[in-house]
Image (cartoon, helix red, strand yellow):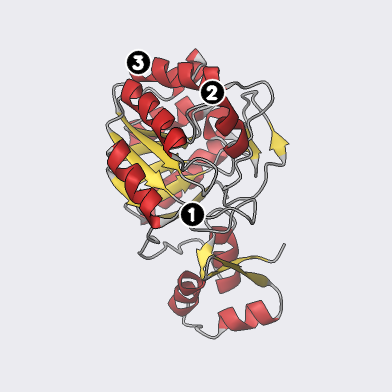
Amino acid sequence: MYTYGPVPSRRLGRSLGVSLIPHKTCSYSCVYCQLGRTRRPCIERASFVPREDAMAEIETKMQTSQPDYITFVGDGEPTLSADLGWFIEQCKSRWEVRVAVITNGSLLFREDVRTALASADVVMPSLDAGDDETYRAINRPHPDLTFGSLVDGLMAFRKSFAGVIRLEVMLVRDVNDSDDSLGAIHRLAERLRPELIDIAVPTRPPAERWVRAPEPERIIYAQRLLRAAETMTRPEQGRFDLAGFDTVLAAIRGLSSRHPLRRDQAQQIAAAFGQPEELERLVDEKALKEVAYDSTRFVLPAE
């Protein structure tokens, strides 16, 4: 499947996710990534999925749901898709719906990437570091990428993009939450002038198990320094669209492979099928697995 949801999003309301990228094909291997370590480090853009098949799936979803956004986010870095601009244009021409792209921003130094994103309503790039050392520690970029190219790309995109830039800063304890690190991010954000800044912290099982959210006082300091519009420390709430799923197992597997589910969310899905006891059975039989992170339990595909 190329689409998932609509799912509840803390920033985008009901978001219909679209993935045009094979699982964990990315230009980064961020320590906090909820999808795990990058399996296919990549910076070359390509067509990874059949255009018409993916577009037909989006069309089917749009016939049965009314999302607030169609969001290109993917199982890796969405700007690696050479078809991204075509998909954005198609969505904008077919439906009166806003389009968002969640990107790590690493390829914005490329003119073709900036052109592909031009018709989006909201682009949400990441800026987790204000210097090269921190950049490499938290984002673990492809060896051919540099911190300088990230900054140059963000600034060039700011000049050309007419939509909303919603910058995301992911904070990780003892990696980028010091006064020096936050000060460096602040200086770059002041140059970039995004319409909005969101501060995020790890809330789902990360690629590296040692990753933790900063202490509350560091988050508050960051929020004040960066003048963040939102601090994403609370779990999202809302119901998942289960159209297209025939069983509890298929629904939980399909959603949690891209959007790790808290146990209460997985239980909500089982109840929606009228089988509230099915989740326990699937976990007992190891069709699904439970993982604990920071006092919260999550349900994931067993494989």
Which three-letter amino acid code belongs to the residue tagged 2? Answer: Leu
Instruction: Pick whichever of labels 1 and 2 is earlier in the sequence.
Output: 2
Which three-letter amino acid code belongs to the residue tagged 1? Answer: Ala
The one nearer the camera, 188 or 194, is 188
What number of labels is visible? 3
Element at label 3: helix
- Tell me the mark number nearer the camera, choosing from 3 and 1: 1
Which three-letter amino acid code belongs to the residue tagged 3? Answer: Ser
Outermost front residue: 179
Q: Residues within 10 Å of mark 2 (few under 14, many from 20)?
A: many
Which residue is located at x 43 percent, y 22 percent? 154
The one nearer the camera, 277 or 218, is 218
Which residue is located at x 55 percent, y 22 percent? 147
Instruction: Pick whichever of labels 3 and 1 is earlier in the sequence.
Output: 3
The one nearer the camera, 207 or 63, is 207
What separation in Å lies between label 1 and label 2 (alpha carbons)? 27 Å
Q: Residues within 10 Å of mark 1 (few under 14, many from 20)?
A: many
Picture coordinates of residue 232 (x, y %)?
Answer: 37, 52
Instruction: Pick whichever of labels 2 and 3 is earlier in the sequence.
Output: 2
Identify the mark at residue 160; answer none if there is no mark. 3
Element at label 1: loop
Residue 154 sits above or below residue 205 on the image: above
Identify the mark at residue 213; answer none if there is no mark. 1
